Amino acid sequence: MRKPAIYRGLLVYPRFASHSFWNYQATCEVVGRRYSAAPLGLTTVAALFPDNWQLRLIDRNIEELSDSDIDWADLVLTGGMLPQQRDTGAIIARAQALKKPVLVGGPDVTCSPEHYDIADFRLMGEAEDMFSEFLKAWDEGKRTGSFISTQFPDIKNRPPPRFDLLKLGHYMHVGIQASRGCPFSCEFCNVIELNGRIPRIKTAEQIIAELEALYALGYRGHVDIVDDNLIGNRTAIKPLLAQLGIWMRNRRYPFELSTEVSINAADDAELLRLMKEANFFAVFVGIETPDDEALRAANKKQNVGRNVTQNIDTLFRAGLFVNAGFIIGLDGERQSVSEAMVRCIHDAAIPICMVGLLYALPNTELHRRLQREKRLHADPDCPEETDADQCTSGLNFETLRPRVDVLTDYRAVIERIYAPVAFFDRVRRMVRALDVRGHKLRQPLGHILRDLRSFLKITWRSLQNPEIRWHYLKTLQDALAHNPRAMKVAVSMAALFLHYHWFARFLSHQIEGRIAESKCPSSSIGRIG
């Protein structure tokens, strides 16, 4: 039997803009990292390659891509999300200029394949469903083609991602995935379009194998379970969490976990107990708006009628500090939402809030509806050159409320919640409520010394800024007096604020410019249709 040819694949993760809500550059600097999160999609795809492929990975968020890297490869693989679209295009053009074929995959090419016509290969959908077809075509000598998934594949019995390709020491955290899909039908969300409404869950053995792979590589610390809603199927996820808790205990807690959940997690005491035993310490929750009518209009009915303050407090009492998502610009808004949103964030004591302007993502029900109503802007799926996420972009359509009012609300919320006095007040109240008893993280001595150096850097940077200095000291004092076990959380919030304090000012200035443009009567934006 003829021995298969040896090929070289270069996986290139596109760059996010430096002015993103999620970029954390100032925070990375003080904790000795280059970027917040390690790329998971490309390492997942890497695990699908057979043994006759040699692979390398370049993450453009932490390192440069050289011509020699591209020259080494027989195939360049890239792709990512909408905020990475421009850099993905640049990678494709650069590789092709060096006569290398390019395969592009990921959520953005799946939702907007027309933006990637220049790529030699396009994979649309989840890679597991059609990657073998691509490999067969490649082995047959084909150097162009499009491969489209027609179903949502079973994700059980898949190999662990190739974490060995990552430079693990450069990231604040590493991600794994436990499930895909979400049972809800929020109009603005593309998760159900990309991954379906029926959650597909890996086995406990798979998740533990992935954690074992990270453990064997010497990684310790924060692992983010990147699911869009870990508890989409609570009945199925609970046995997995129970097994994960046993593994954590047996391994003496080498990792602390975070994830994203819907707010109904607060209704399930057993679920929260299992998450605590599995060493979860943080969750992201999509609250979106305190306006029930706007929630109904966006089909986020699972949040309607909720006592947000009470629900968030329940999560705090379960040892989970909460990051939350909010949206301004929903069609259901009938009047100014800034006061109610600021009050909701203040009352719930949520320090980190990703407040974004509504963005009609391609291939969502919102996008289709706005297209039918002829309200989408021309080329709404291609963000402006400086755009990075729903904070710096958004409102790619004609709003029902006056655009100036929406933008004014947005600026007011950002400026108020990230004012130092307001932010650190929420941190202090959150730290008092947070029950971190039972939370454990066993780290090597070198990691403990690294964390000590980070604490000293965070303290120095905070004390150097007169706007932050006294709020930071007051927060440390309050944590020591009322919940010393949660001191690490208080310091972590201060580290994140080094980024958000700058970002809020940057964003306020940008929104001020957009308000001025919206007030200009000569300003007009094209529509579809």
Image (cartoon, rainbow, N blue to C red):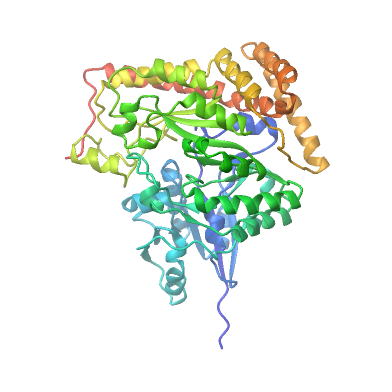
Q: Residue furthest left?
A: 529
Which residue is pictured at 68% across the width and 25% down the height?
491
On the question of residue 389 being in view, the answer is yes
Front-lying residue, 64 or 516? 516
Q: Is residue 357 above or below residue 265?
A: above
Q: Report the quarter where the C terminus lies.
A: top left
Question: Along the horizontal axis of the image, is 460 left or right of 27?
Answer: right
Q: Is residue 458 above or below residue 449?
A: above
Determine which quarter of the picture holds residue 495. Answer: top right
Q: Residue furthest right?
A: 445
Front-lying residue, 339 or 118? 339
Q: Position of residue 229 (x, y in %)?
A: 48, 44
Question: Along the horizontal axis of the image, is 250 left or right of 285?
Answer: right
Q: Position of residue 186 (x, y in %)?
A: 35, 40
Q: Position of residue 367 (x, y in %)?
A: 28, 41
Which residue is pictured at 60% across the width and 50% down the height?
241
Q: Report the quarter where the N terminus lies.
A: bottom right
On the question of residue 70 being in view, the answer is no
Determine which quarter of the picture holds residue 293. Answer: top left
Q: Position of residue 37 (x, y in %)?
A: 58, 42
**How many marks can you see?**
0
